[in-house]
Image (spheres, grey):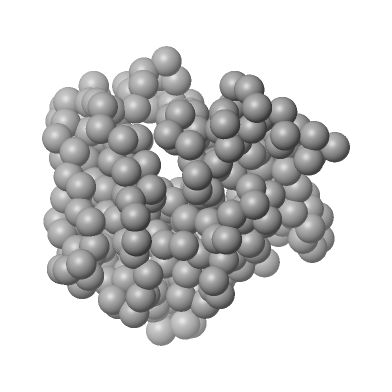
Amino acid sequence: MLSLILAAALLSDPVSAPVTLPSEPAPLHGALLAPEGGARAAALIIAGSGPTDRDGNSPLGVSASSYRLLAEGLAGHGVATVRTDKRGIGESASALTSEADLKFTDYADDARAWAAETARLTGQPCAWLIGHSEGALVALVAAGEADDAVCGLVLLSGAGRPIGAVLREQLAGVPEPLLGQALAILAELEAGRPVAEIPPQLVALFRPSVQPYMISWLPLDPAALVTAYEGPVMIGQGTTDIQVSVADAEALAAARPDAALKIWEGVNHLLKVAPADRAANAATYSNPDLPLAPGVVDDIAGFILQPR
């Protein structure tokens, strides 16, 4: 059935086809968008943190559909994409039985498997990994252990520092004694030691069920990972991103001087035109009718399709 859908997609307007990846305890689900006239390349779009679905939306107030818009834009350039519901999210909800069972490496393992499946479905020799936000780090970890199924990396709005440094920066405004307690918990988790007693004000961040994930996430250094990766890399970052800074992109680029660095003026975390004002910027998070910023899709497609 899927082959017939693919054939139709290659001969007409881009068509979205459901795709499934075997997994335990349940399959993972996503969508393939194949471009008109045949795919010139293929890419896997890897979602950012939290309960983010294949379109880039989340029940935590995000409905901008950035990943769907990116897939549609890339299809116009001849790049086929697979975008997926993360393990435990959307149609992939049954693939995670408990938050406490989740490790960062699970997402990287899923990305490697999806990359191979993306290449197979599209008839390409390999697939690009387009990682957004935390997905950029997932892409880096996945690519470091992947075989020839990965063509290269496109890292969008990704942190350039270990998450511990980011959390310390975000916690700086917390009053004492809560700040001291938070930093002590963070230090224990960085040392690989779970913390049983969490102050009520910090449960959302450090709840026991999320600690195994954090312990597997905290040691990862994006700059070190991008240095070790030998394939082609593009780094994309907007100047009005209120979640990740241009300094993060520059840190990644400093670690990989041969990477293509694209800084998009007036573009926010969701790759849309937005002002620096926090309230107006955040308003774009719930607007699926707002297109991706000019240049974003063109730059990504141009990098993927350039001769090598």
The residue closer to the viewer here, 278 or 149, is: 149
Asked if residue 215 can be seen in this view, the reply is no
Image position, residue 275 (x, y; %):
17, 26
The residue positioned 36% from the left and 18% from the top of the image is: 290
Question: What is the quadrant of the C terminus in the image?
Answer: bottom left
Q: Foreground residue, 285 or 66?
A: 66
Image coordinates of residue 261 in percent, x first then y, are 20, 54
Residue 8 falls in which quadrant of the image? top right
Q: Residue at x 24, y 62 (%)?
A: 259
Q: How many marks?
A: 0
Picture quadrant of residue 281: top left
Quarter occupied by the N terminus: top right
Residue at 57% in and 66% down: 149
At x 32%, y 43%, the residue is: 302
Extreme-right residue of the structure: 1
Residue 169 on image: x %, y %: 21, 59
Residue 297 position in % (x across, y down): 35, 35
Left or right: 161, with 152 as reference point: left
Q: Is residue 102 left or right of residue 203?
A: right
